[in-house]
Image (cartoon, rainbow, N blue to C red):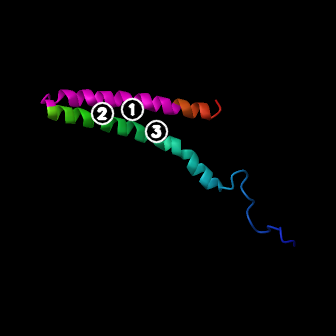
Amino acid sequence: MGAGSKRGHEPEPPGDGRSPLARTVSGLGPYLQIGWIFVFAQLIGTGIGWWLDGKLGTRPWLLVAGALLGMAAGFVNLFRVTRSLGKGGGR
């Protein structure tokens, strides 16, 4: 039994030295980002519309317009991220 023997231990992960669980969790990051992109775009658009309605007295029209613009921005960002994930996946 030499000093370099690793009997009874799991083999070292290849490459970056991280465990398989750590590599899996870090690989999930972009996919978890997808949901938040849409939610935040919607909240920001709706918030801006609500704020402008309060300033200009046009309730509820700018709120509706802001919500629709936020939804559109969310879908655009959603498609960008999913397209970049598809390219990174080697397809």
Circle 1/circle 2 CB separation < 8 Å? yes
Position in image of residue 52 (x %, y %): 20, 32
The reply to whether callout 1 and callout 3 are in contact (CB within 8 Å) is no
Which percent across, then down, holds residue 89? 62, 35
What secondary structure prevails in the magenta region? helix
Q: Which residues are magenta?
A: 56-82
Classify 10 Å Cα crowding around label 3: few (below 14), some (14-19), many (20 and above). Answer: some
User: Is-magenta flag for residue 88?
Assistant: no
- Up/down of 17 relative to 56, above or below: below
Q: Which residue is mark 3?
A: 34
- Mark sitting on residue 45: 2
- Horizontal side, residue 44 vs residue 9: left or right: left
On-image quarter of the C terminus: top right
Indicate yes or no whether the magenta region holds residue 66: yes
Which residue bears the numbered disc 1?
Answer: 74
| Amino acid marked by disc 1 | Gly
Q: In x, y percent, where is residue 90?
A: 65, 32
Q: Is residue 47 left or right of residue 88?
A: left
Give the foreground label among 3 and 2. Answer: 2
Residue pictured at 58% horizontal, 45% vertical: 27
